[in-house]
Image (tube, rainbow, N blue to C red):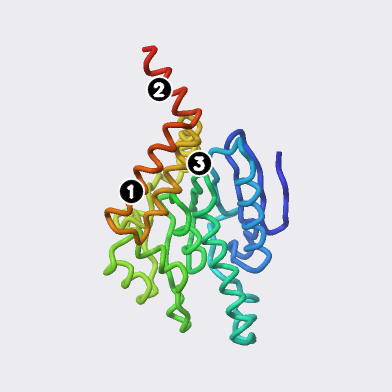
Amino acid sequence: MSETRHEVLYAIDGAIARITLNRPEKRNALNDATIDGLKHALHEADETEAIRAVIITGAGADFCSGADLSALQKISESSITENLEDATSLMELFAQIRRVRVPVVAAVRGRALAGGCGLATACDLVLAASSARFGYPEVKIGFVPAMVMAILRRNVSEKRAFELITRGGEISAAEAERLGLINHVYEDEAFEIETETFVRAFEKVSRSAVMLSKRLLYHMDSMTFDAALEAGAQLNAIARMTEDCQQGIARFLKK
């Protein structure tokens, strides 16, 4: 099953939904149509009960280079109200990724810069080819990687986040992994196979348990320690009543 939109490709491969940014000639730069396409594809994946994980990747050599020239031109000519609406659309995409019930995995080849790096950072998991590059170069043109900052400072230390967003440089995949910005780095020639193996592992664990775990992890943001423990206890009780847990316990007891 697949659906093609010019800017974004969406396909289902077994229990995996694949979303591909499809503007290779523009280094998969973000524009209104691309952001809308991503939202639509994520919604489709979230509504499909058979899906266990979602992969976001880019066609061609790069993952995503951020906003394209037409988007930057639009920013320069828009009013504050129009720019706020535009920024809110990207904010909604980042928030939507966290609301998708199953894991959303960024598979990064080539460059993930500016909004493209923000898109990868917004995903639950990030896998990268060894030659991939990451960075937030917005400050070089007087811009601010503002919305992704809420996610970035939850992924890396405050000092590292400060460096990444104020110096505007690029870092390697190995450095990004060391900082905690991404999960795993694979050699370029093995990237597709390793990514497939990693994501397919979600087919072998309980879908409901993974969904509840994702929900609880993000729900705990900004909670006090006691409140987080209480939320965990409540969700623990809910998990015990799911069909997956009941069947899993039954299988274990039969061993």
Q: Which residue is mark 1?
A: 230
Residue 90 lies in quadrant: bottom right
Give amino acid for label 1: Glu
Give the Cα distance between marks 3 and 2.
35 Å
**Residue 65 or residue 154, whichever sits in front:** 154
Near-viewer residue (168 or 234): 234
The answer to which of marks 2 and 1 sits earlier in the sequence is 1
Q: Is residue 229 above or below residue 88?
A: above
Determine whether 12 is above or below 76 in the image: above
Please indicate whether residue 42 sits to the left or right of residue 223 in the image. right
Residue 68 x, y percent position in the rendering:
60, 72
Residue type at mark 2 is: Ile
Between disc 1 and disc 3, the foreground one is 1
Residue at (44% x, 38% y) in the render: 238
Q: Residue shown at 34%/53% (left/top)?
A: 177
Amino acid bearing label 3: Glu
Label placed on residue 249: 2
Pointer 3: what residue? 192
Label 2 Cα crowd, 10 Å radius (few <14 / some 14-19 / many 20+): few
Give me the C-alpha separation between circle 1 and circle 3: 40 Å
Q: Residue at x 50, y 28 (%)?
A: 243
